[in-house]
Amino acid sequence: MTVRYVSTPDAPAPAGHYSQATVHQGVVYVAGMLPLDPATRELVPGGLEAQLERTLRNIEAVLVAAGSDWAHALRLTVYVPDMALWGAVNATYARVLGDARPARAVIPTRELKPGVLCEIDCIAAVRA
Protein backbone atom coordinates (compact mmCIF):
# COMPACT_ATOMS: atom_id res chain seq x y z
CA MET A 1 0.00 0.00 0.00
CA THR A 2 1.46 3.35 -1.04
CA VAL A 3 0.32 6.52 0.70
CA ARG A 4 1.71 9.88 -0.34
CA TYR A 5 1.69 12.74 2.15
CA VAL A 6 0.99 16.19 0.72
CA SER A 7 2.53 19.39 2.02
CA THR A 8 2.43 22.89 0.54
CA PRO A 9 3.43 26.27 2.00
CA ASP A 10 0.35 27.70 0.24
CA ALA A 11 -1.89 26.31 3.00
CA PRO A 12 -1.50 26.39 6.79
CA ALA A 13 0.94 23.84 8.16
CA PRO A 14 -0.61 21.13 10.34
CA ALA A 15 -0.90 21.96 14.03
CA GLY A 16 -0.24 18.37 15.05
CA HIS A 17 0.92 14.96 13.87
CA TYR A 18 -1.00 14.78 10.58
CA SER A 19 -0.65 15.80 6.94
CA GLN A 20 -2.42 18.52 4.99
CA ALA A 21 -3.59 15.64 2.79
CA THR A 22 -2.86 12.07 1.87
CA VAL A 23 -3.16 10.46 -1.55
CA HIS A 24 -3.95 6.78 -2.01
CA GLN A 25 -5.08 4.94 -5.15
CA GLY A 26 -5.92 8.14 -6.99
CA VAL A 27 -7.93 9.72 -4.17
CA VAL A 28 -6.91 12.84 -2.21
CA TYR A 29 -8.05 13.13 1.41
CA VAL A 30 -7.63 16.73 2.62
CA ALA A 31 -7.49 17.24 6.39
CA GLY A 32 -9.88 19.63 8.07
CA MET A 33 -8.79 23.15 7.14
CA LEU A 34 -9.39 26.31 9.13
CA PRO A 35 -9.54 29.94 7.93
CA LEU A 36 -5.91 30.60 8.72
CA ASP A 37 -3.51 32.70 6.68
CA PRO A 38 -0.92 30.22 5.33
CA ALA A 39 2.03 32.54 6.05
CA THR A 40 1.14 33.62 9.57
CA ARG A 41 -1.23 30.85 10.75
CA GLU A 42 -3.42 33.68 12.09
CA LEU A 43 -7.21 33.65 11.78
CA VAL A 44 -8.25 35.81 8.80
CA PRO A 45 -10.16 38.98 9.68
CA GLY A 46 -13.78 39.41 8.63
CA GLY A 47 -16.91 37.40 9.07
CA LEU A 48 -18.10 34.05 7.84
CA GLU A 49 -17.69 34.79 4.12
CA ALA A 50 -14.04 35.81 4.53
CA GLN A 51 -13.36 32.75 6.65
CA LEU A 52 -15.09 30.41 4.22
CA GLU A 53 -13.21 31.82 1.25
CA ARG A 54 -9.83 31.52 3.01
CA THR A 55 -10.61 27.94 4.07
CA LEU A 56 -11.66 26.97 0.54
CA ARG A 57 -8.53 28.65 -0.91
CA ASN A 58 -6.41 26.67 1.57
CA ILE A 59 -8.07 23.45 0.40
CA GLU A 60 -7.60 24.46 -3.23
CA ALA A 61 -3.85 24.92 -2.63
CA VAL A 62 -3.61 21.45 -1.10
CA LEU A 63 -5.62 19.93 -3.96
CA VAL A 64 -3.26 21.49 -6.52
CA ALA A 65 -0.22 20.24 -4.59
CA ALA A 66 -1.78 16.76 -4.63
CA GLY A 67 -2.43 16.85 -8.39
CA SER A 68 -6.12 17.68 -8.20
CA ASP A 69 -8.49 20.67 -8.35
CA TRP A 70 -12.10 21.67 -7.72
CA ALA A 71 -13.26 19.94 -10.91
CA HIS A 72 -12.14 16.64 -9.34
CA ALA A 73 -13.55 17.28 -5.85
CA LEU A 74 -15.91 14.51 -4.79
CA ARG A 75 -17.13 15.57 -1.36
CA LEU A 76 -16.68 18.38 1.16
CA THR A 77 -17.82 18.48 4.76
CA VAL A 78 -18.39 21.97 6.16
CA TYR A 79 -18.55 22.43 9.92
CA VAL A 80 -20.19 25.62 11.23
CA PRO A 81 -21.31 26.73 14.70
CA ASP A 82 -24.90 27.43 13.60
CA MET A 83 -27.11 26.18 10.74
CA ALA A 84 -28.45 29.75 10.43
CA LEU A 85 -25.19 30.35 8.51
CA TRP A 86 -26.20 27.90 5.75
CA GLY A 87 -27.24 30.61 3.28
CA ALA A 88 -23.90 32.41 3.55
CA VAL A 89 -22.10 29.07 3.31
CA ASN A 90 -23.96 28.20 0.14
CA ALA A 91 -23.38 31.57 -1.53
CA THR A 92 -19.64 31.69 -0.79
CA TYR A 93 -19.20 28.02 -1.67
CA ALA A 94 -20.89 28.55 -5.07
CA ARG A 95 -18.80 31.66 -5.81
CA VAL A 96 -15.48 29.99 -5.02
CA LEU A 97 -16.17 26.56 -6.55
CA GLY A 98 -17.84 27.91 -9.71
CA ASP A 99 -19.02 25.08 -11.94
CA ALA A 100 -17.67 22.34 -9.63
CA ARG A 101 -20.49 20.66 -7.72
CA PRO A 102 -19.06 18.04 -5.37
CA ALA A 103 -21.31 16.37 -2.83
CA ARG A 104 -21.43 18.33 0.42
CA ALA A 105 -22.63 18.15 3.99
CA VAL A 106 -22.99 21.17 6.28
CA ILE A 107 -22.81 20.09 9.91
CA PRO A 108 -23.44 22.30 12.94
CA THR A 109 -20.96 21.89 15.75
CA ARG A 110 -20.44 24.00 18.82
CA GLU A 111 -16.82 23.02 19.39
CA LEU A 112 -14.87 25.11 16.87
CA LYS A 113 -11.88 27.13 18.09
CA PRO A 114 -12.65 30.64 19.45
CA GLY A 115 -13.42 33.03 16.60
CA VAL A 116 -13.45 30.25 14.00
CA LEU A 117 -16.72 30.07 12.04
CA CYS A 118 -15.91 27.12 9.77
CA GLU A 119 -13.77 24.06 9.24
CA ILE A 120 -13.86 22.10 5.98
CA ASP A 121 -12.43 18.78 4.83
CA CYS A 122 -12.43 17.41 1.29
CA ILE A 123 -12.10 14.21 -0.73
CA ALA A 124 -11.10 14.49 -4.38
CA ALA A 125 -9.82 12.42 -7.26
CA VAL A 126 -6.34 12.99 -8.65
CA ARG A 127 -6.39 14.43 -12.20
CA ALA A 128 -5.75 11.73 -14.76
Image: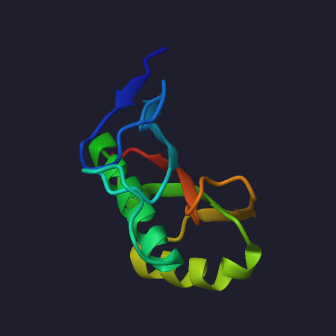
Residue drawn at (43%, 63%) of the image: 56
Residue 24 horizontal/vertical position (percent): 47, 29
State the count of labels.
0
Foreground residue, 81 or 6? 81
Whether residue 50 is visible to the viewer of this picture, yes or no, is: yes
Q: Is residue 18 left or right of residue 61?
A: right
Residue drawn at (42%, 59%) of the image: 43
Q: Is residue 58 above or below residue 29?
A: below
Q: Is residue 84 above or below residue 31?
A: below
Q: Is residue 91 left or right of residue 109?
A: left
Residue 8 horizontal/vertical position (percent): 27, 41
Indicate the quadrant where residue 22 lies: top left
Residue 119 horizontal/vertical position (percent): 57, 56
Which residue lies most toward the front here?
114
Foreground residue, 80 or 99? 80
Residue drawn at (33%, 41%) of the image: 66
Foreground residue, 127 or 49? 49
Which residue lies most toward the top here?
1
Indicate the quadrant where residue 36 lies: bottom left
Residue 93 horizontal/vertical position (percent): 50, 75
Looking at the rendering, in which quadrant would you find the C terminus?
top left
Residue drawn at (48%, 29%) of the image: 16
Q: Is residue 38 left or right of residue 92?
A: left
Whether residue 71 is visible to the viewer of this picture, yes or no, is: no
Q: Is residue 16 above or below residue 90?
A: above
Foreground residue, 42 or 60? 42
Q: How is the image coloured?
A: rainbow
